[in-house]
C-alpha cells in the first residue's frame, strides 16, 4: 500500500496560466462559440407538423378511391408518391 506513504499534495504543480477572471471570460467565450454551433430552432408550440402523416394521407387516398374520385391506377401512383416522400424525409 504505497499510496499511504506518499504525502498529500496540497499545492498545484504548475501556476495558473491566466488570472481567474480572464480564464472565466475565456471559458465563457468558448462556451458561447460552442452553443452557436449547436443551436436548433425550437418548434413552435401548437404548430402543425409541416409533413403530413403517412397513415392519414393513405386513409384520405383510400376514401377518394372508395368514393370514385380516383381510379385504382391513380391510387397506386399517389400511394407510391406518399410512401416515397415519407421514406425520403427520414
Image (cartoon, rainbow, N blue to C red):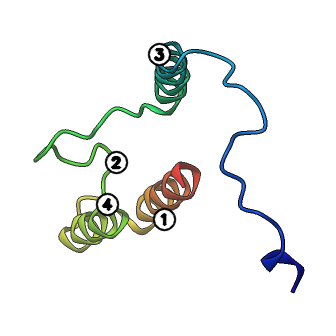
Q: Which mark is residue 22?
A: none
Question: For residue 75, which quarter of the picture?
Answer: bottom left
Query: Which residue, given by chain and number where applicable, does mark 2 sit on?
Result: 51
- Between residue 6 and residue 12, name the one nearer to us: 6
Q: Is label 2 in contact with label 1 (beta carbons under 8 Å)?
A: no
How many numbered circles are shown?
4
Which label sits in the foreground, 2 or 3? Answer: 3
Left or right, residue 78 beside residue 5: left
Determine whether, in the image, residue 17 is placed left or right of residue 29: right
Percent across and percent down for residue 68 are 23, 66
Which sits earlier in the primary sequence, circle 3 or circle 1? Answer: 3
Q: Which residue is mark 1?
A: 76
Which numbered circle lies on residue 25? 3
Give the residue at x 47% y 22%: 24
Check if mark 2's residue and mark 4's residue have beta carbons within 8 Å: yes
Q: Compute the Cα span from label 2 to label 1.
A: 20 Å
Label 3 Cα crowd, 10 Å radius (few <14 / some 14-19 / many 20+):
few
Q: What separation in Å lies between label 3 and label 1 (alpha carbons)? A: 62 Å
Residue mark closest to the camera, 4 vs 1: 4
- Residue located at (21% from left, 70% from top): 63
Say if mark 4 contacts mark 1, CB within 8 Å.
no
Q: Which residue is mark 4?
A: 53
Amino acid at each position: 500500500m504505497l499510496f499511504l506513504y506518499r504525502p498529500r499534495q496540497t499545492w498545484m504543480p504548475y501556476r495558473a496560466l491566466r488570472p481567474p477572471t480572464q480564464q472565466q471570460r475565456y471559458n465563457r467565450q468558448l462556451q458561447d462559440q460552442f452553443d452557436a454551433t449547436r443551436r436548433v430552432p425550437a418548434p413552435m408550440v401548437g404548430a402543425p407538423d409541416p409533413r403530413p402523416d403517412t397513415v392519414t394521407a393513405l386513409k384520405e387516398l383510400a376514401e377518394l378511391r372508395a368514393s370514385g374520385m380516383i381510379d385504382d391506377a391513380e391510387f397506386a401512383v399517389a400511394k407510391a408518391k406518399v410512401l416515397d416522400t415519407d421514406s425520403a424525409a427520414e
